[in-house]
Image: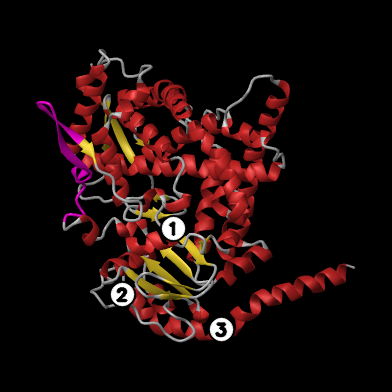
Amino acid sequence: MKNFWLTEAMVELGQFLLPFLLVFPSFLLLFIITKNKSSRSTQNPTPTQGDLPKSYPIIGHLIAANQQKDKFQWLTNLLISSPSSTFVLHRPFGFKSIQTADPIVVEHILKTKFHIYQKGLYHRSVLRDFLGDGIFNVEGEAWKFQRQVASHEFTNKSLRKFVENVVDFELSNRLVPLLLEAAKNRRVLDLQDILQRFTFDNICKISFGYDPEYLDPSLANQEFAVAYEEATMISTARFRSFFPIVWKTSKFLNIGSEKRLKEAVSKVRQFALAIVKEKKETILKSSENSEDLLSRFLKSGHSDEKFVTDIVISFLLAGRDTTSAALTWFFWLVHKNKQAEQQILEEVLQNRGKQGNKTEHLNSTAYEEVKDMVYTHAALCESMRLFPPVPVDIKEATSDDVLPDGMRVKKGTWVTYHPYAMGRLEKLWGPDWAKYRPERWLQKTENGVEKKWRFVPRDPYSYPVFHGGPRVCLGKEMAFLQMKRVVAGVLSRFKVVPVAEEGFEPVYVPYLTAKMHGGFRVRIEERCEFE
């Protein structure tokens, strides 16, 4: 019996390795030929229009991609330089991937032909170990069910409760005291880490009725958080691989990064499963009607612990990583743009003045205050234009199609749209696209003798930061309310000063959700205006 299973395992391993072994000598020769050229290419200069990389038989754009130190920026530059903002990336063995930053194409795949462009089998296989059958990795009825149950989380009543109970508690009892202590002791903080802890506590409390107390004054490295970062990073690396056979083989052999992914996912699932089991016990013992997201799923008839655990992990990704990423880049950009910072401060103080108490930084009118912060809303939109929390999104054609520009799409082709590149297109944002300018989202309106700002949104296909079409982000309003509350609570009391040399520019790292490479080291200074 043991010999039988050993034989089966060797056959399966052979199926994994044979294609790789057959083509490896050719690829090795090509890499040697291009090594000198690659070593000289330390930058990613923006190509001129029509200067697209050469594709070769069998290997496609492998040589061009191998010469890039930053493949993500390389793809961004190609989209910016392309006259149509779309080009075809040829992967090895004839597989094609369409890359686009064209709003018309984005609308086509997210809305017009939504039924054709889905997650796809490969996309789901890449993320299945991490996200399982959570809302971000399923389609069809499973997706509709999770979305329908989750939609109850985003009513006006729930949003008000979220801001005035959950966010304000975390802000006044944890974040502000921590920043105050850092200011007094001139302690350097990693603000990216702090914001991830803040949003993690918030999403756990509002969605699962559980307080992990991650923003504890000790800022201890919790095992779950480290494992979550590892799982996110390695899952992203799977997408980037030109040879999926490599990670699939590593997974089969349980070696290297795939072994680390398995260990990390195990820790993440243990954490999420513990939340699920605790919530189940609470529901059984308590007669109170819990209204959090997890309770709704457990009461919907889906008691399978693996399925509910998948849901928990997906909502942690949505509620923790995206919002903290947006806020991290926001504080960097505002520090560099003092005029925008001053406008935000004036708006914050003006809104508090309406309630008759400028010095009380937290009160029961929080929901109304943040809803009226129009300039701050525009400032957040502008920072996410330049540094979107989700850098790219991939769809797979489930049948043959033709894009609006006439490009034919065969079944199984990936179509990837790039919010990061779209935020850098001159034809969408004008010649000053590189400038951080919240005013591009605003118009002055007459209100009697007073002129006020009015927010002017962009369509979700020119600005797909919150997705678009049937899968548009349910938590968009919740994210803005949370971010504006944090901005008001932090900037009104503190100056956030990056610890970096003159001329330093942070690096945007495109994982499943974007990160600032190396964290965001800052000093916190109290504002005299608040005293």
In this rendering, does residue 499 appear at all?
no
Neighbor class of circle 1 (other Cα within 10 Å; few <14, some 14-19, many 20+) is many
According to the picture, the residue beneath numbered tag 1 turns out to be 110
Query: Which of marks 2 and 3 precedes in the sequence?
Result: 3
195 to the left or right of 490: right
**Residue 321, position as x, y percentages in the image:** 45, 43
Q: From mark 1 to mark 3, how far is it between C-alphas?
A: 37 Å
Query: Which of marks 3 and 1 precedes in the sequence?
Result: 3
**Picture layout, residue 83 above or below residue 277:** below
**Residue 322, position as x, y percentages in the image:** 43, 44
Q: Secondary structure at mark 2?
A: helix
Span shown in magenta:
432-453
According to the picture, the residue beneath numbered tag 2 turns out to be 40
**Picture layout, residue 52 above or below residue 237:** below
| The N terminus: image quadrant | bottom right
8 to the left or right of 388: right
Q: Secondary structure at mark 1?
A: helix
Which amino acid does the dot numbered 1 rest on? Leu
Which amino acid does the dot numbered 2 rest on? Arg
- Total marks shown come to 3
Which amino acid does the dot numbered 3 rest on? Val
Image mark for residue 23: 3
Q: Nearer the viewer, residue 125 or 154?
A: 154
Closest to the camera, between mark 3 and mark 2, is 3
Q: Secondary structure at mark 3?
A: helix
| Residue shown at the point (50%, 77%) measured from the top left | 95
Q: From mark 3 to mark 2, how far is it between C-alphas?
A: 26 Å
Query: Which of marks 2 and 1 precedes in the sequence?
Result: 2
